[in-house]
Amino acid sequence: MKKVTLNQEVLYYDFVNCPKGYEVDRYQIRHEMMLGYINRKKEHPPLTSYPINHCLPFDHLGEYIRDFLGQFVDRQFTMIFKKRFGYILKQDEYVSSRNDIDVLDISASPVYTLVYGVELEDHSSNLIIHHNIKKTPNCTWSISMQNNKFIIFPSHLNYEITANNSKLNSFYLIQTYDEVIS
């Protein structure tokens, strides 16, 4: 008997645990997110996500994610960074269901989405991934978000971040990637 996998929806998640000297500086990422927020605050209508300028911690995070996936994925591919933006959620704010696919340009859309908890109180909100299981539509998978936790999943899946139940702002970094099969 032979087996062919036509479609497989896999999510990977863990905490970022970089070697000493290469830790992800979450405070610098948060600083860059705040600058993006301040620079775009006056747009009409106001944006809910904010672009972020590049800084060294993004290189450390990107290398960690590539190395992490290399250990768990059974095929050879290279992840190519596409886009980065952030969400700063005040108390009771949330990110409604969305995905990172451009329906007008599917071929230029990313393959993977990374959600990273930059600065948030433990269990202040959840990431919910929407998916289908064969004939069962509208299934969800939920995970409580924490500092330094990441989830990477196919970009065509809808996701949402539940309302921030903390009095402190929650900072989420979103990065998208394309893949090149080796």
Image: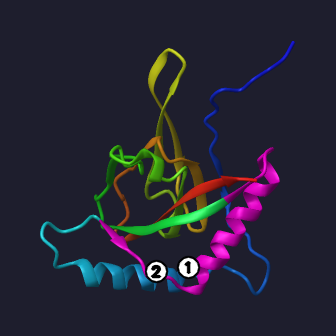
Q: How is the image coloured?
A: rainbow
Seen at 55% across and 79% down, the residue is 26
Seen at 40% across and 69% down, the residue is 86
Q: Nearer the viewer, residue 174 or 77?
A: 77
Q: Helix, strand, or loop for circle 2? A: helix
Q: Is 21 above or below relative to 41?
A: below
Tell which residue pokes out farthest to the left in this image: 44
Which residues lie in the magenta part?
Answer: 49-78
Q: Which residue is mark 2?
A: 30
Residue 71: percent from left, percent from top: 82, 54
Q: Which residue is mark 1?
A: 26
Seen at 56% across and 59% down, the residue is 177
Q: Which mark is residue 106?
A: none
Q: Amino acid at mark 1?
A: Arg
Q: How many marks?
A: 2
- Which quadrant holds the N terminus? top right
Q: Is 130 above or below relative to 87?
A: above
Using residue 131 as the reference point, say whether residue 14 is left or right of it.
right
Q: Amino acid at mark 2?
A: Arg
Labels 2 & 1 near each other (Cβ < 8 A): yes
Within-10-Å neighbours for mark 1: few <14, some 14–19, many 20+: some
Residue 68: percent from left, percent from top: 75, 60
Q: Is residue 172 visible?
A: no
Q: Label 2 to label 1, Cα distance in Å? A: 6 Å
Which quadrant of the structure image shows residue 48?
A: bottom left
Seen at 16% across and 79% down, the residue is 42
Q: Is residue 131 visible?
A: yes
Q: Helix, strand, or loop for circle 1? A: helix
In the image, is residue 55 part of the stretch drawn in magenta? yes
Residue 139: percent from left, percent from top: 47, 28
